[in-house]
Amino acid sequence: MFPRDFAWGAGTAAYQIEGGWQADGKGASIWDTFTHEGGRVFGEQNGDEACRSYELWDEDLKCIETLGLTHYRLSLSWARLLPDGNTRHVNQKGVEYYNKVIDDLLACNVSPMVTLYHFDLPQALQDQGGWKSAGTATLFDSYAKFCFHTFGGRVKLWITINEPYVCAKLGHEDGTHAPGLKEPGTAAYLVGHNMLRAHAMAWHSYDSLYRAQQEGAVSLAINSDWLEPLNAGCAEDIAATERLLAFTLGWFAWPVFVTGDYPEVMRSAIDAQSEKSGYSSRLPSFSKDEPAILGTADFFALNYYTSRKVKQGGGCGEKLCMKSDRDAGEVLDPSWPICGVSWLAVVPQGLRKLLKYIKNNFNNPAVYVTENGFSQVGRLQTEDVQRAEFYKDTIAEVAKALQEDEVNVRGYFAWSLLDNFEWADGFSVRFGLYHVDFADAKRKRTIYRSGREYAKIISKNRCGQS
Ligand code: GBH
């Protein structure tokens, strides 16, 4: 069914699980600031302690071993390693922590996939303008080089930035994620631009300084829903779907995989709106004097959760905003169950379609599904039958993508290893293969039925091979 070397993983992110927000010299990140401001997160919760993985890593390792994962995706906390965001001051305790995590994984035959940036910018850099500032890309490159140098002998799969879309839009357009800026129609494009520049600089650094020796692969994780026109025969809906895809998947994948620049439909839509409001274009251009963006991904890292139908329309009145630029509205198909968090319509077959789309539009890259999952809200159910079915169904779609559509899928990472701090939803939304008891000082981890199901799928596919 699955190739012998297929990666079976699960993922986490530093701020969502580690806790220890001030332990051993860690600097503050924008999520520390954002959650402590109040009024931002469900129940005024924060990640000060979260799953306490900073102290309880051994417990996480047990979970990883029980599941039989071949890969574990974790992120590094930039401010734990470099409290001020720059390499002038290195927090040795932070280095030791991640050294232990990586060494323990390798000792258990589990390959780490390491994300350098999962939403948690050092606050010190936010104070200097954050991702709106061009200089943050250069500082990211230094941080990346520090990590390649320190851990790259042992880490062969790197993700520079997780979901630049979410950082840009939720953090700077909607203001629902840190740093909580609401500057619709402008800041998000600038932030996305600097993140692409940062990613490209780091990829080029790896390529020229580390690749020959370390022989790893570097990409960025792009999140996208699968989108289809609401009315398949309606030209407006078809155009709206194409536009929305350009503003989500295309925003980051097109520059990196196809042309080195933003999708034409995205630029022309933004320019048209800008003209109407007397603005010059709000979508920056890449400079020829900087490292090229095109070709800066050694594989495609896809975070897929859900699907949408699309129709023309939507906007925010006279004001500038991304919604008006897109002029595309999202609709849920009534046949898709919504389980848990409100945005997550369960559509496993959307993943197969998206994988095929990626194969056809981005030059048949090697693909890792770096996140995919299903959430639970309300009463705790450790016998989470629906989620167990979801994993079975979704992995069956990945198998079809591999066999029938011949997509070069190399791995699948469930989100998440543990129930954790689910950003603005705090601990009210549970994505784990393991339940975490946040009322317990020891943060007891208990496997869900879905975790057992995933372990079964993994073992069947690893042992059934000749
Ligand atoms: C992932 O993003 C994150 O990488 C991960 O850290 C997180 O735990 C996981 O999702 C589960 O949420 O509230 O209507 O504005 C997934 C992509 C894109 C999904 C933005 C939620 C917000 C919809 N996310 N989307 S809305």
Image: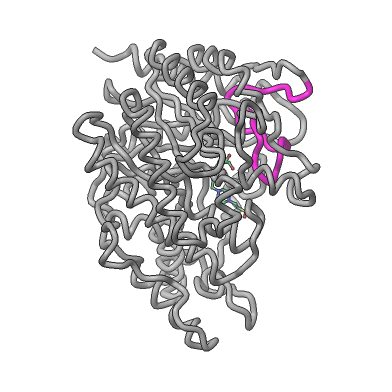
Q: Give the image location of residue 231, x and y in percent.
A: 48, 66
Seen from the viewer's position, the closer of residues 275 and 227 is: 275
Q: Give the image location of residue 71, x and y in percent.
A: 40, 24
Which residue, as the protein is rendered here, is positioned at the far left? Answer: 212
Who's the residue at 67% across and 42% down the image? Answer: 32
Which residue, as the protein is rendered here, is positioned at the far front? Answer: 88
Who's the residue at 27% across and 40% down the image? Answer: 366
Task: Please identify the quadrant where the C terminus is shown.
Answer: top left
Left or right, 47 with respect to 361, comes to right
Seen from the viewer's position, the closer of residues 143 and 275 is: 143
**Quarter of the image where one finds residue 437:** top right
Seen from the viewer's position, the closer of residues 458 and 167 is: 167
Q: Is residue 417 magenta?
A: no
Q: Give the image location of residue 20, x and y in percent.
A: 66, 28
Q: How many marks?
A: 0
Who's the residue at 63% across and 83% down the image? Answer: 318
Task: Please identify the quadrant where the N terminus is shown.
Answer: top left
Who's the residue at 76% across and 39% down the image? Answer: 45
Q: Give the image location of residue 130, x and y in percent.
A: 54, 56
**Quarter of the image where one finds residue 271:** bottom left
The answer to whether residue 208 is above or below residue 244 is above
Left or right, 353 with respect to 77, comes to left
The answer to whether residue 149 is above or below residue 456 is below
Left or right, 128 with respect to 224, comes to right
Boundaries of the magenta span: 419-439
Specify whether residue 418 is in view: yes
Color theme of the render: one colour
Specify whether residue 1 is in view: no
Most common SS among magenta residues:
loop
Seen from the viewer's position, the closer of residues 391 and 191 is: 191
